[in-house]
Image (cartoon, helix red, strand yellow):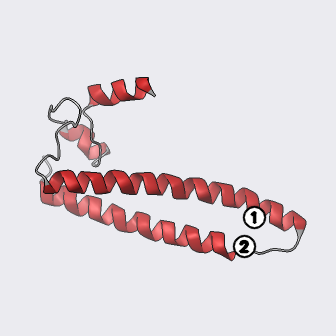
Amino acid sequence: MASIDMRRRQLTERLAELNERMQLIDEELDAHNSRDWEELATERETDEVLEGMGLSAREEVKAIQAALERMDAGEYGYCVKCGDEISQERLDLLPYTPFCQNCAAEVARQR
């Protein structure tokens, strides 16, 4: 079983990685200024991929920050929907998850 300190360290390290990635994406997006139409079209396609990666990273950052807040409140490891304990296996895969497996499946069905 992983300790809260180990989980906090894991989440903090991932947060740093994501922040670095988002910084690199922003720099890459700001660097495009081609005057050639073909190159501009290619840059636009690349920008769409980069923007998608940035959006995904921002969503993960929000989830990690929420998990860190739950840790501070002493609520980490418990489902925010039903209150049951989240399995260690699930936390090993998704250390920032706010839901137990059953509630996560229910939330996914509702989307």
Q: Which residue is mark 1?
A: 43
Examine the image and state in which quarter residue 45 appears: bottom right
What's the residue at 42%, 67% (across, down)?
Answer: 19
Residue at image point 10% right, 50% down: 74
Q: Is residue 36 above or below residue 74?
A: below
Q: In the rendered view, does 82 fall on the left or right side of 19?
A: left
Q: At which x and y percent is residue 67?
A: 25, 51
Q: Is residue 29 left or right of residue 79?
A: right
Mark 1 vs mark 2, CA separation in Å: 7 Å
Q: Which mark is residue 94?
A: none
Residue 47 lies in quadrant:
bottom right
Mark 1–mark 2 contact, CB under 8 Å? yes
The residue indicated by pointer 2 is 32
> Is 44 on the left-hand or right-hand side of 54?
right
Q: What SS does tag 1 mark?
A: helix
Q: Position of residue 29 (x, y in %)?
A: 64, 69
Between 42 and 71, the one lying in front of the other is 71
Please identify the quarter of the rendering in which residue 10 is found. bottom left
Residue 5 is situated, as x and y percent measured from the top left of the image, at 14, 60
Give residue 52's position: percent from left, percent from top.
Answer: 58, 53
- Who comes first in sequence, dot 1 or dot 2? 2
Q: As displayed, is residue 105 above or below residue 25?
A: above
- What is the secondary structure assignment of the residue under circle 2? loop
Q: Where 40 sits versus 61, above or below?
A: below
Label 2 is placed on what type of residue? His
Q: Which residue appears at 57% of the width and 67% of the height? A: 25
Q: Residues within 10 Å of mark 1 (few under 14, many from 20)?
A: some
Q: Amino acid at mark 1?
A: Glu
